[in-house]
Amino acid sequence: MERLQLHSQIKGVSTGTTILAVKFNGGVIIGSDSRASMGESYVSSKTINKLIQVHDRIFCCISGSLADAQAVTKMAKFQLSFHSIQMDSPPLVKAAASIMKELCYNNKEELQAGFITAGWDRKKGPQIYTVALGGMMLSQPFAIGGSGSTYIYGYVDAKFKPDMTLEEATQFSKNALALAMGRDNVSGGVVHLVVITEAGAKHVVVPGDKLPKFHNE
Amino acid sequence: MSEELLAEPGWLSEEVKTGTTIIAVTFDGGVVLGSDSRVSAGESVVNRVMNKLSPLHDKIYCALSGSAADAQTIAEIVNYQLDVHSIEVEDDPLVCSAATLVKNISYKYKEELSAHLIVAGWDRKEGGQVYATLSGLLTKQPFAIGGSGSFYINGFVDAEFRKNMTKTETQEFVVNALTLAMGRDGSSGGVAYVVTIDKDGTEEKCILGNELPKFFDQ
């Protein structure tokens, strides 16, 4: 219990969230819950979308302070579109993540937001980059973040396989988010999923009653 | 830099906590308890092979977490009280009695103590049972997890637990859960101790680090 309080104290006023991104055969799925909370007992929004599109095939999901996260992603979106005009080609996912990383690292004293950037580009295909609180950038086959993610570390460690199909990866994401939302009181609402492939990005919303149910429900 | 060199090691001044992962699961005919083996004092590991599954009676065990001293003391006191009780009733004690004795101590001294014990066992009346006694409450559950490492496996146990598994399936479930928690929690680690209790008796097993199941690791 003490450990949980410390977690949210470090994060400050937070979206209190669960976010994840997972690579599958041909693309990535990025997903989140939809609850925004003020303190630990007031839900300020039930249907907030934490998946921000920074370019056609690059999305970002945010955790930590909502204000900081929105400011960073807005700036990153602008810099990225400028960059892609200069390069005359769609930006690399790594470029998007690097822009966020620069912003987080150079302003690490003031900012309190973490991101998972995921997308598809022609050079390396599907990729996922985590940018942590202090500005560390890490490339991973799957990533989880937010307060609800502590509860599903065991589940994703056990269930993730490289090169899943789209159906398997969608089920994996839905299960993981549903489990986290079931245990974390500051995560909840509906599940937002975005599937990013070479063909483009598709947004899927899974309402609460369509989420998978587990033994204690 | 010089301050760090002169500072005394953590284990001289920090309280010894079991900072742990414990789990107990009922199956059709008994219970399986599991724990890791790491005891930490601040950042140092002061014991890497501690068995946190403590017998309260022949077929009743408890799993310790929180402050090591508090947990061990509660277990010893309840062990004594159960012996007296079983002489008085001239029969093996019920798991519910053991859990109630633990709960009584936890609740009465809840300000001073900081230990969480999971009590599990088998008795002739109700079969296998698991009781959680977090800071003085008492609930009977199909399974219970506790300790710092348990946060990371909440999702896993919610997804994978089924009622009435076989003994082997339950042992596998417990070992998998412990392995996943030890993989993510800095205060859990070492070996896995597993105790299986059913009507035929009690079986204690120790699974070494290199024999634990492997999961996806990048």
Image (tube, rainbow, N blue to C red):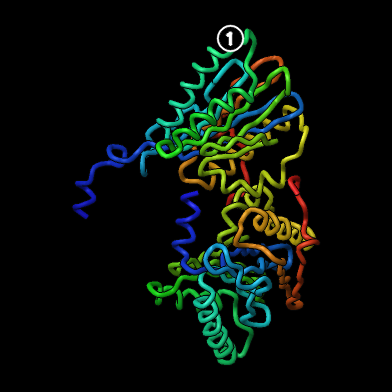
Q: Is residue A84 above or below residue B145?
A: below
Residue at image location 66% in from the left, 66% down from the top: A33
The image position of residue A40, as x and y in percent, is 54, 62
The image position of residue A75, as x and y in percent, is 52, 85
Which residue is nearer to you in this view: A83 or B10?
A: B10
Q: Quadrant of residue B137?
A: top right
Q: Which residue is mark 1?
A: B88
Q: Is residue A156 above or below residue B112?
A: below
The image position of residue B42, as x and y in percent, is 36, 43
Crowdedness near tag 1: few (<14), some (14–19) or many (≥20) residues, C-alpha within 10 Å? few
> Relative to residue B98, is residue A161 drawn left or right?
right
Residue at image location 57% in from the left, 48% down from the top: B152
Q: Is residue A75 above or below residue B68?
A: below
Q: Quadrant of residue A26?
A: bottom right
**Callout 1 secondary element:** helix
Residue at image location 45% in from the left, 69% down from the top: A135
Instruction: Check disc 1 and give the amino acid type.
Output: Glu
Res B208 visible: no
Which residue is nearer to you in this view: B61 or A160?
A: B61
Residue at image location 49% in from the left, 61% down from the top: A8
Disc 1 sits on a residue from what chain? B
Res B25 visible: yes
